[in-house]
Amino acid sequence: MKRTQIYITEQQDVWLRQLAADRRLPKAAVIRQILDAALESGDAEAEARAGILAAAGVCADYPDWPEWQRTVRGRTADERLRGLGA
């Protein structure tokens, strides 16, 4: 790994901080992901990892599965089975 220093605009820093927070990664890791994507590194594993990391946490605020099912179905599976006499 090689260390480097760059200058970015205030707006770029805002976007970068937000992206890093959304991905739960350090800004440096996000910068490397952006550079890999822009430079098309050809590293399939790195690209797959970047895709997974980009998607990580997207559903963090979503309800868990049983909660979601109740909102869709209205009752639990046990309640539905008891209603059928099972």
Image: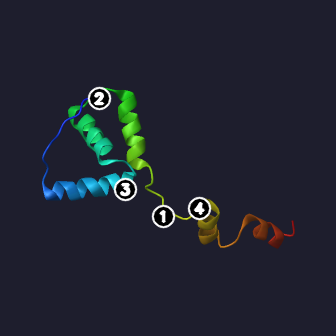
Disc assigned to residue 51: none
Residue occupying image coordinates x 42% and y 42% = 52
Name the mark on residue 61: 1
In the rendered image, residue 81, in percent from the top left (x then y), is placed at 80, 66
Distance CA(mark 2)–CA(mark 4): 39 Å
Q: Quadrant of the N terminus?
A: top left
Name the residue that disc number 3 marks.
22
**Horizontally, is 12 left or right of 17 in the view?**
left
For disc 4, the neighbor class at 10 Å (few under 14, some 14 to 19, many from 20) is few
Vertical comparison of 32 with 74: above or below: above
Residue 74 vs 43, above or below: the answer is below
Q: What secondary structure is marked by label 1?
A: loop
The three-letter amino acid code for the residue at tag 4 is Asp
Residue 28 position within the rendered picture, expressed as x and y whole percent measured from the top left: 29, 43
Could you give the CA–CA distance between mark 3 and mark 2, rounded to whole angstroms? 24 Å
Residue at image location 16% in from the left, 59% down from the top: 11
- Residue 1 disc label: 2
